[in-house]
Amino acid sequence: MMQQTISQPTSVAPERRVDLDWVRIGAFGLLILYHVGMFYVSWDWHIKSAQPVAALEPLMLVLNPWRLALLFLVSGVATRFMLRKTAAGALLRARSSRLLIPLAFGMLVIVPPQAYIQIVEALGYSGGFLDFYLTHYFAFGKAFCPNPCIILPTWNHLWFVAYLWVYTMALGLVVMAVPGIAGWIERWLAPLLSGALLLVVPSLLFAVFRLTLLPHFPSTHALFGDWYNHALFAGVFVLGFLLAHAASFWDAIERQRWIALALAVALFLSWIALRGVRDGGLPLRLYANFAYGFYQWLCIVAVLGFARRWLTKDSAARRYLTDAIFPYYIVHQTAIIMIAHGLRGSGLSAGVEAAVIVGGTAATCIVTFEIVRRIGWLRPLFGLRPDTAVPAMPMHPSGQAAN
C-alpha cells in the first residue's frame, strides 16, 4: 500500500491543522478584496472604474508578492495529509474530480459574463450576451484583437485551479514512481530549514526566480510558457508537501515569526522607495529583486507563524468556511465584474461604489453557497463532495445562527 511506502518522520505535526485552514480561508478572503481593488488601481484588469483610487496601490503591493504563493504552499500541505489517508492513485482521481469539474463548469458558465462585459466596456459591443457566447466565446484562440485581444474561451481567475491540478498530478506521479521519495527528502530538508536558514534559503530561491525567469517569462497565467510562476508556485507547493509533517520546520516558523515580520516590513519599505528610481544602475536593480524575493518568503513565514501561534482553536465558523471558501472563490470575480458594470454611470462616489461591490459580492457568494450545498448535483460543480450532508451555519454564543 502507498501509505506504507512513505517513510514517517520521527516527529510529526498534527494531522488536523486548524491554523492552516484559517490561513486558507483568510488568503481566499483577501483575494476577493484584492480583486475589488483591481477595479480601482491603474494596473491592467478586465474592467476599470471611472474613479481610480491610487491610494489603494501601496496596500495592494503589500499583498501581491506572497498571497498566491501562500495558497499553493498550504495546498501542498493538504495534499500530503490526504496522501496519508489514501493511495496516490485514488488521491489523483479524487483531486481531478474536485478540480477539473469546477474548472470546466466555471469556464462554460461562470466566467463567460466576465469576458462579455470586458468586450462591452472595451469595444462597445452591441450584441447581447447570448450572441457573444454563441458567436465568439468558443473561438479557441485570440479574439477582438488588437485591443483587448483576449483568448477565448478563458479561465480568468480560475487559472489557480488549473495550475493546482497540474502540480498535483505531476507530484502524484512522482510519488507513485518513486515510493518513499517524500520521506527521504523530508529527512534531509527538515533539519536544513529548521534554523536560521529557514529565512534565507527559500528567500534566495525566490529572488533568483525573479532575476532569471521573470524578465523572459512574464506572468500570464496561461499555463504554457508561464515559467516564472511555475517555478514560484510549484516550488512552494512541493515545499509544503515535503514538510507537511516536519514538526521541527513548523516549530521554527512559529519561533521566527517576529523576526520574519520585522525583516519583511523593512524590506518592503526599501523596495517601495526604490520603485520610483528609474535609473539606479545594476546594484539597485539587484537589491530591488532580492528585497522582493526575501519579502515574499518572509511574509509567508510570518503569516504561518502567527497563525500557528494564535489560530489553533476549532469552531463552527472554521468548519463552515472551510467548505464555503472554494465556491466563494469560483463565483466572486464574476459577481465583482457584473456588479461594477451595473453601477457604471450611477454617480456614486468611489467609496459608496466600492462598498456596494464588496457587499454585493459577499451576498452573492453566501447565497450561492447556501443554494449549492443543499443540492446534490450542484455540489461537484463547485468543488464540494457529492454528499447530502449540509454543514451547519456558524452559531453565535447565544445559539442564534450567524448572519
Image (tube, rainbow, N blue to C red):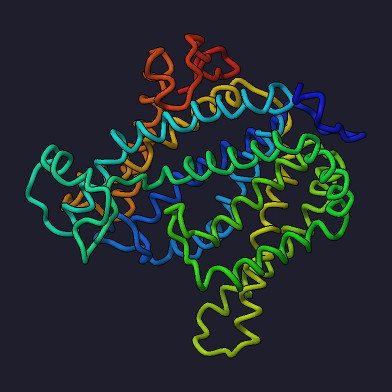
Farthest residue toward the front? 177
Say which of 99 and 283 sits in front: 99
Give percent across and percent down for residue 25. 56, 36
Left or right position of 386 against 80: left
State left or right for residue 169 relative to residue 355.
right
Residue at 36% over, 66% down: 42
Residue 250 x/y as whole percent: 80, 43
Q: Residue furthest right?
A: 10
Indicate whether 140 appears above or below 282: above
**Relative vertical location of residue 203 with respect to residue 76 in this rendering, above or below:** below
Residue 94 position by quadrant: top right
Task: State the image coordinates of residue 95 (x, y, percent, origin top left).
Answer: 55, 29
Which residue is pictured at 52% across the width and 73% down the height? 215
Answer yes or no: is residue 341 visible.
Answer: no
Left or right of 85: which side holds 349? left
What quarter of the picture does the C terminus occupy?
A: top left
- The answer to which of 163 and 402 lies nearer the viewer is 163
Image quadrant in which you'd find residue 211: bottom right
| Viewer-proximal residue among 32 and 2 | 2
Instruction: Report the residue at 44% width, 61% height from top.
Output: 56
Outermost residue toward the left in this view: 126
Q: Residue at 69% x, 65% y: name it.
A: 294
User: Which image quarter: residue 266?
Assistant: bottom right
In x, y percent, where is residue 188?
87, 49
Say which quadrant the N terminus sits in: top right
